[in-house]
Image: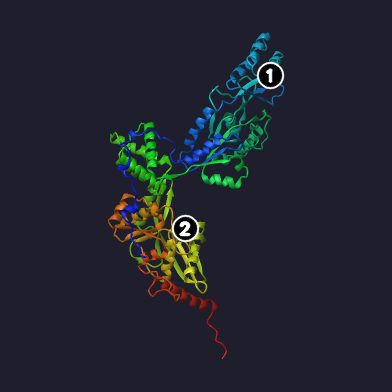
Amino acid sequence: MTVSPLGAPALRRPCDPAGLPFETTADLTAPKGPLGQERALEAVAFALAMAAPGYNLFCMGPEGTGKRALTGALLAEAARQKPTPDDWVILHDPADPLRPTPLRLPAGRAKGFLAAVDALATDWTAEWSAPAAEDGGAAFADLPDVAPLFARLSQDSATGKIWRAEALVSHAPGAGAPIIREDNPTRAALSGWVEHVAAPGAPVVSLIRPGALQRANGGFLLLDAHKVLTTPGAWEDLKHSLRHGQIRVVTEAERALGAVAAPTPEPSPLPLALKVVLFGEPDLYYDLWDSDPEFAALFKVAADFDDQMKRTPEAVLGLARVLAEGGRAEDLPPLDRGAVARIVDRAVRLAEDTDKLTARMEPLIDLAREAGFFARQDGAGVIGRDHVERALTAQERREGRVRDLLLEEILDGTIRVETTGAVVGQINGLAVLDYGRASFGRPSRITCAVRVGRGEVTDIEREVDLGGPLHSKGVLILSAFLSTRFSVDGLLNLAASLVFEQSYCEVDGDSASSPELYALLSALAEAPIRQSLAVTGSVDQFGNIQPIGGVNEKIEGFFEVCAARGLTGDQGVLIPRANLRNLMLRDEVVEACDTGLFHVYPIATVDEGIAILTGLIPGERGRDGGFPEGSLNRRVARRLESFARRSRETFDGPPRRGRP
């Protein structure tokens, strides 16, 4: 059951610069395809190829995965291959000004039609020339639906009935399908609106302004899902347009939100045929799927952009090509192999898995750009590993004010965290704090008090509404563990209280369940816990230690406190053995472990952990049902037995004497 601390090779798996097949990124060509997003782009291509209704697209994934850029590249190619959509003009009949008529024209013909209508309007007071009208009408002889209409306009103008025409949307012939991105998706911005324009000395003119749906008709409309959903009326309008295949301009009354509005022109709906692409987070997609029955019918395809990819030589080289291409686009110096290897290490750390790389290219490109800044400061023609290290250090310093403040409060005693001695019922837990881009680990003192009771394990964080549901679940598991291991014949007669000392914000997650269990066992057995150690890991009701997130930040957070006070060789962190693949620790932590000044213990069970923390053997039940003398479990069992006796005396009273 003895657990040995990890050696340096297990604590970090760096990229070997010698294994990279280039000297600098100047030797590399552009990326040969999308990096790590093949599944998502297959979904995008499928949605673009499907002409049936409802095959709109929801692109989901964390920011920085390239979902917009990669999808945009496929959209651009698809748009080039699609026919250019028709032009649309709006005709205003002076006899019915509130019912403008939309008119469809082939791409590029709207401009000529407007010029011809304007000519009729400006020439009607002069001696009307039938040949001139015929010349104008001849321009549309190839359009069977337009020529008779223009003839009618010509006849009306001869009698002083002047029609007005305005372009709603127009396209250059051969331009392909439009790609429209609407960043402010109000109802009017999506569906169009009526604008009233008054020139000095002229009557007010109502103009129909196109929205994103009209401008994207026949092509592609790109929207941020969160913005659409949080803009009043926008989501319902979008669904209505997609469901009915038509666009209806937002009226003045609708824009007035119930207030009295003057009558305004309301053109007939336009037929709609386009592909809508929504971008959003996975949680938002699943929420819509569960809560909106129309969503699944209108957005039949989801492109799920991953935030990780397998760490293969091909993926590493692909990442180097992405860095090379980004550097060339910004005229940065090339990166040498050492610099690329260090950025690969950063990609592994962000993925939190030594077998994976992050697929979020944005922070890696930012790192290369900032390293280039330091290279130029040095007058270097190549970005080296030291420039990347300086960029990382600068990032940590810029974002580290809160981290440094908390460390200072621990060191000056404002926040009490002990790293020497041994204490009963007290242990150092570990948590990850997120402040903007900064993410760091910090130790927190967890204490436990026990007394006679009726089997209650009280989570004080929950009692004061500072404990989240996952944390509360972890505390309930502690009761199940105690019952499974120690309560053979009846209920547990104890009351225990657990608390994160000096914690004033919400606590959630189950990664503290194992340190809470150790504190509880320590309090019951009256066995002191080494304060030079910190613990993270969740536990199941059978005592198995389960993996947690943020293992690197948690180890480094406790290391910083110990290093600031002075490393003694007795300090370290207990982590779940299942987290071994996630270890990508900073160099200074690895060096301290390699020299024996700090330790990382991988444990698989509660018994392995309690032995390290207390120095006592846990002990297994023998054939007689008891635990070995001197074992921690024996001490816990005896304490619980004493609680049971005292409980009977307290709650049931002294035993009654029988009759003689």
Quickly name the residue at label 2.
510
Q: Is mark 2 on a helix, strand or loop?
A: loop
Q: Could you tell me residue 533's position as x and y percent? A: 36, 61
- Circle 2 packing at 10 Å, graded few (<14), some (14-19), many (20+), is many
Could you tell me which residue is drawn at 63 percent across and 20 percent down?
Answer: 202
**Toward the viewer: 269 or 86?**
86
Q: Which amino acid does label 1 sit on?
A: Leu
Left or right of 350? Residue 191 is right
Query: Mark 2 or 1 closer to N-term?
Result: 1
Given the image, on which type of amino acid does mark 2 rest? Asp
Q: Which mark is residue 149?
A: 1
Snapshot quadrant of residue 233: top right
How much space separates mark 2 and mark 1, taking CA atoms? 73 Å
Q: Which of 241 and 158 is in front in this view?
A: 241
Left or right, 97 with respect to 401, comes to: right
Quarter the C terminus occupies: bottom right
- Quadrant position of the N terminus in the picture: bottom left
Identified at 40% across, 74% down, the residue is 628
Discs 2, 1 touching: Cβ within 8 Å:
no
Res 637 label: none
The residue positioned farthest toward the bottom in the image shown: 660
